[in-house]
Amino acid sequence: MCGATSASAAASETAAAPVVFKEYVLASPKPNLAKIKANKIEKPVLKFGIIKLTDCVPIVVARELGFFAEEGLSVSIEVQANWKLIVENTVAGSLDGAHMLAGQPIGATIGYLGQADMVTPLSMDLNGNAATVSTKLWAQMQEREPRLKEPGHAHPVSAASLLPIAKERAAGGNPLRFAMVFPVSCHNYELRYWLAAGGVNPGFYDGYNDPVGKREADVLLSVTPPPQMVQTLTQNTIDGYCVGEPWNQQAVKDGVGVPVFTDYYIWKNNPEKVFGMTKLFADGNPNTVVAITKALIRAGHWLDDSRDNRIKAVEMLANKAYIGANPDVLGASMLGTFEFQKGDKRDLPDFNVFYRYNATYPLPGHAVWYLTQMRRWGQIPGNKSDSWYHETATKIYRPDIYRAAYAKLQEEKLIPEATLPTDDLPAFVGEDFIDKIAFDSKKPNDYLKLFPIGLK
């Protein structure tokens, strides 16, 4: 598997002494001008967008450690306010590429809430999300499921205890409300997957132009930008949310929320973020795109290579130019642990994976899964053939670009040799999913028929 050189080196050394983080001073890498000519770089000056989440870190690392500069690229990074702006600014051309939700290039290309042809040459990470409920809702769940009161209870927590609460709240005209970050986000689909696995209907969308998806819903889901999640929970506007880090750990630190699952338990080693760009940019700047991909692959490898590298990365993210949050909170998950309640800190070495398990490879089978969830919940309004799923996935997720970049890195001996996937449309065993339903990306329609809750 890709990145097996250090197994869980970056995250498994969790018994080490407490980390004292240092203040990080931004680097000023100078582009290798010779590479611009040698590699026929079409656009050497670039601007990339990020959201304030720990999984933006491959882009930050590639800039700060000079991986972009070594490819002849001068890269600036601009924090964006929300995921909607990430896509809009990339499509408009004010960003050349961005940290994106894995579902965003897919949703844009198929025309959900607007159409724009987009591609991704690289997956940025696996896992990395969690869902948190308010302390009030957690207490109600504990009353209905007493084992949740036991110290060290098993995870993930089932959503089954929410069903009677949801029915009571809905009958009283005050339905349970959960936030996620965007309609085509992994967070939306993971939250829906968790709810449905517990018998709670999260609601259906009415096609490409419906941003809400509340038909037949037992609970209401809405969009909130990641940095606003904790505040919105504290104000009792919502009862829970699904988001990336550091916003679940911040809720624990502030004493306002309890995480009920990490997405590793929803789907083991699930695809999380990608580096997205328009198809127009990719087609018009093929050498530049390969150079970008090379730098990001190196960043992913560096992040998973050692615990010291992860510590350095946390210090980078803590700089106000990027996330600007408390490094202790940022480091909680980045260094291989996760705190579910104060004092209940557990080892989760694979909470963030940036290179191991072929994390950087843009696997079309992952895109097929996202498309099945879009159909399951009604964002895709009608049945599609298996071939449509496959053709759509392979034109958006671009392993051909990745393989070209990876081959160059091997020629230049910049990363160790590893084994890339041999099947771009693989099957995933049921044991990897919370509901034990296996997923064969070659047979998406058969997969959809297996869900008790969901469109077929």
Image (spheres, rainbow, N blue to C red):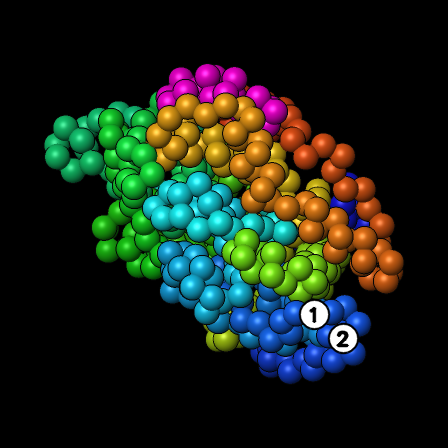
Query: Please, what is the three-letter code of the amino acid marked with disc 2?
Result: Lys
Res 331 visible? no
Judged from the image, the secondary structure of the residue bearing numbered disc 1 is loop
Q: Nearer the viewer, residue 191 or 120?
A: 120
- Which residue position is annotated with label 1? 41
| Residue numbers of the magenta segment | 439-456
- The correct choice, above or below, for 219 with respect to 345 in the image is above
Q: Residue at x 12, y 32 (%)?
A: 172
Which corner quadrant of the image does residue 230 belong to? bottom left
Q: Is residue 449 left or right of residue 454?
A: right
Res 245 visible? yes
Query: Please, what is the three-letter code of the amino acid marked with disc 1?
Result: Ile
Tell me, yes or no, whether the two marked residues, 2 and 1, touch with CB atoms within 8 Å. Answer: yes
Q: Position of residue 116 (x, y in %)?
A: 44, 51
Quadrant occupied by the C terminus: top left
Q: Position of residue 437 (x, y in %)?
A: 53, 21
- The correct choice, above or below, for 27 with respect to 132 in the image is below
Q: Residue at x 70, y 59 (%)?
A: 290
Q: Residue furthest left?
A: 172
Question: Dominant secondary structure of the magenta stretch?
Answer: loop
In the rendered structure, does residue 222 fall within the stretch colored magenta? no
Which corner quadrant of the image does residue 201 belong to? top left
In the rendered structure, does residue 451 fall within the stretch colored magenta? yes
How many marks the image carries: the answer is 2
Q: Is residue 6 left or right of residue 239?
A: right
- Which residue position is annotated with label 2? 37
